Image (cartoon, coloured by chain):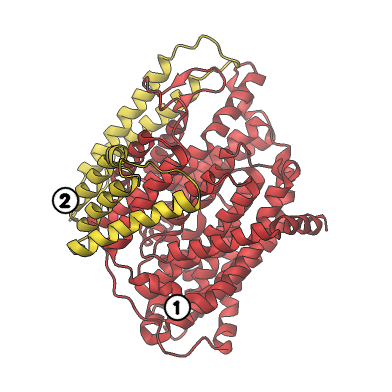
């Protein structure tokens, strides 16, 4: 019951009026930005990140605000998926399959309510699991030395490359680019400048806010500018509200989806997109007796929604307990922690319990808050869908640059943001996934430091990386992960079609 | 439309070159002192090699890329305006520069001229109020004081 007393401590951190207000503000702001058509959760976090930093909040408050934004934006994204058929995030594609038909039948309000409840169920059950699992996992990981960490990170990259979207070679290229990008600047161990090309501005390395805004916000605007997505807004509808009976019928689907979401979310690299796709397919197989899936079946909406949120929350487990992010958004949060010079990982729970437990407690609060905030206010947020493109995207671009400037006070960083944005746009056109690149960027320093630490213990003998049984186990698992698609091409192809069908 | 295999060929060769460049750069680093036996060279060289291998594999086994034809003019307008924005920011100040950026971008998104102009000014003023006045993070003021 140690977890419960720690959790109580976490609530004492999160329940200060200031932090509660931040959680509420984050959830509301996140929902508003997430509801804007085509602006996914990761963009919402990324847009608000520089402002969070420049406010000089204490780290636990900043993290609580970010978690609120994270939750809110996930919910906001559902509004545009269901009413507009525009998913702002790969994880939301499955939501449109039954959500949009429901909205067209005039049951948009019911669909949004169901999606909110499904997210609440998935999120809360997963936080509950997280509360009791994080510390035991972290305790196992405390014994990890540098060699085990190196092997674990390589395993995470291997999982990313085979389970994620896109070709394995392209994901590896993205990982390498992220690692190389993080090396720009002065090397801590020797004071040598790497990859700066004599530029003074590059000495400190690429600023994290610059990278994320360029990578996601700017590239998104360019993609939209090229293709000009448009959709007809379906109105909330005057149809029946969600009935208790319908909700009860969806409960088994939600529970199954929570299990799928949790399991896939804990694995680094798979994340919410795969989880929601699998949950939808599984639910369809179990319950599609009358061929109602895809035509507005409530269970077809509840399953991916619940799995999506369960996976999003579960990806906090490796982030908090091991310091290894499994998704784009947790990578952003990890980057945020690193900017406060806090290294997440097993010691976080003992050294900075106010951060670890404060964040976990705020996840409970965030889930409740969203439900309370959104069930009555969803109509208001849905209005945001009516903002025309020619106001929305200029506004997002302006806010991006204003945020980068506020965080860095540098014209050079603005130019770099645009440069990174254009490069990221080209990469997306070529099918190079961006999220592995972001995760690698965030992990790079940790990886290099651990390699160098391991090898300095052995005085440079690389066999030190394969010295302990745990490390060897991780290396074998990594090798196995890489070999699975080679040995079983059918399996690899199926995983890829599942994630491909969600688009990028 | 499909871009055929040339997209992957270009991407692959680019990655191959960057990978080799990274190895070469790391190799040529001058390290007067390192606190550990490995030093700052090894890691970038390994990563560069991996990137080169990945690039070569994309180059040698290119796959078709689904390529939607879009309006590249609009992309160019948005990108160009973004590149000019820091310059405008320095000389004109936050509100005029941001309004110009939003106007260019809004026109690229096919907004009506008058409406876009009004919206751009309103957005720029709103950001200044929000970020500078409300949150207290200074944004650059131009000759007009805004």
In the foreground, A226 or A94:
A226
**Residue furthest toward the front?**
B144
In the foreground, A47 or A347:
A47
Residue located at (49% from left, 21% from top):
B42
* Residue at disc 2, secondary structure: helix
Residue B77 in percent (x, y) is at 20, 48
In the figure, the shade used to draw chain A is: red
User: Which chain shows up in yellow?
Assistant: B
Give the letter of the chain under mark 1: A
Residue located at (33% from left, 72% from top):
A386
Q: Are marks 1 and 2 in contact (CB under 8 Å)?
A: no
Give the letter of the chain under mark 2: B
Which label was assigned to residue A379? 1
**Residue furthest toward the right?**
A1
Query: With A240 as the anchor, is A473 left or right in this view?
Result: right
Is residue A97 at least partly visible in the picture? no
Image vertical order of residue A430 relative to residue A503, above or below: above
Residue located at (51% from left, 34% from top):
A444
């Amino acid at each position: 019951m140690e977890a419960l007393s720690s959790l109580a401590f976490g609530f004492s951190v999160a329940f200060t009026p200031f932090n509660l207000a931040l959680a509420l503000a984050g959830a509301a702001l996140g929902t508003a930005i997430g509801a804007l058509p085509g602006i996914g959760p990761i963009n919402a976090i990324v847009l608000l990140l520089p402002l969070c930093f420049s406010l000089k909040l204490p780290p636990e408050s900043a993290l609580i605000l970010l978690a609120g934004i994270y939750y809110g934006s996930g919910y906001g994204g559902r509004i545009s998926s269901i009413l507009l058929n525009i998913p702002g995030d790969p994880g939301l594609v499955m939501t449109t399959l039954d959500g949009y038909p429901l909205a067209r039948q005039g049951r948009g309000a019911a669909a949004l309510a169901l999606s909110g409840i499904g997210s609440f169920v998935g999120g809360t059950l997963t936080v509950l699991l997280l509360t009791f699992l994080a510390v035991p996992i972290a305790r196992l990981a405390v014994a990890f030395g540098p060699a085990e960490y190196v092997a674990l990170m390589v395993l995470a990259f291997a999982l990313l490359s085979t389970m994620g979207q896109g070709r394995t070679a392209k994901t590896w290229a993205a990982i390498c680019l992220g690692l190389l990008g993080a090396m720009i600047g002065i090397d801590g161990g020797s004071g040598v400048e790497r990859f700066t090309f004599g530029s003074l501005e590059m000495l400190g390395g690429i600023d994290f806010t610059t990278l994320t805004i360029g990578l996601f916000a700017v590239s998104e605007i360019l993609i939209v500018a090229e293709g000009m997505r448009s959709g007809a807004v379906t109105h909330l509808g005057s149809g029946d509200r969600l009935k208790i009976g319908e909700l009860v019928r969806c409960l088994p689907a939600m529970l199954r989806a929570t299990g799928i979401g949790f399991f896939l979310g804990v694995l680094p690299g798979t994340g919410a997109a795969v989880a929601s796709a699998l949950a939808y397919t599984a639910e369809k197989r179990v319950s599609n007796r009358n061929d109602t899936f895809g035509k507005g079946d409530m269970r077809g909406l509840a399953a991916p929604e619940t799995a999506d949120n369960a996976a999003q929350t579960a990806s906090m487990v490796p982030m908090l307990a091991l310091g290894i992010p499994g998704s784009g958004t947790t990578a952003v949060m990890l980057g945020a922690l690193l900017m406060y010079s806090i290294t997440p990982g097993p010691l976080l729970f003992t050294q900075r319990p106010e951060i670890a437990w404060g964040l976990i407690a705020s996840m409970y609060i965030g889930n409740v808050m969203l439900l309370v905030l959104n069930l009555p206010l969803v109509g208001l947020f849905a209005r945001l869908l009516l903002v025309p493109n020619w106001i929305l995207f200029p506004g997002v671009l302006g806010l991006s640059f204003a945020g980068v400037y506020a965080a860095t006070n540098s014209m050079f960083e603005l130019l770099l943001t645009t440069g990174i944005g254009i490069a990221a746009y080209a990469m997306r056109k070529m099918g190079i996934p961006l999220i592995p690149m972001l995760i690698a960027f965030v992990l790079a320093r940790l990886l290099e430091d651990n390699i160098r630490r391991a090898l300095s213990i052995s005085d440079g003998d690389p066999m030190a990386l394969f010295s302990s049984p745990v490390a060897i186990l991780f290396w074998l698992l990594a090798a196995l992960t890489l070999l699975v698609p080679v040995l079983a091409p059918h399996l690899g192809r199926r995983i890829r079609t599942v994630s491909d069908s969600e688009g990028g | 439309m499909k871009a055929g295999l040339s997209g992957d060929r270009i991407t692959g060769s680019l990655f191959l070159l960057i990978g080799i460049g990274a190895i070469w750069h790391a190799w040529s680093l001058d390290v007067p002192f390192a606190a550990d036996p490995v030093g700052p060279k090894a890691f970038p060289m390994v990563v560069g090699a991996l990137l080169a291998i990945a690039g070569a594999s994309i180059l040698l086994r290119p796959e078709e890329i689904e390529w939607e034809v879009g309006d590249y003019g609009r992309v160019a307008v948005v990108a160009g305006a973004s590149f000019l924005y820091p310059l405008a920011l320095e000389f004109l100040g936050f509100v005029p520069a941001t309004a110009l950026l939003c106007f260019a971008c809004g026109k690229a998104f096919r907004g009506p001229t008058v409406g876009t102009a009004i919206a751009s000014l309103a957005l720029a003023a709103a950001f200044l109020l929000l970020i500078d006045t409300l949150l207290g993070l200074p944004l650059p003021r131009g000759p007009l004081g805004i």
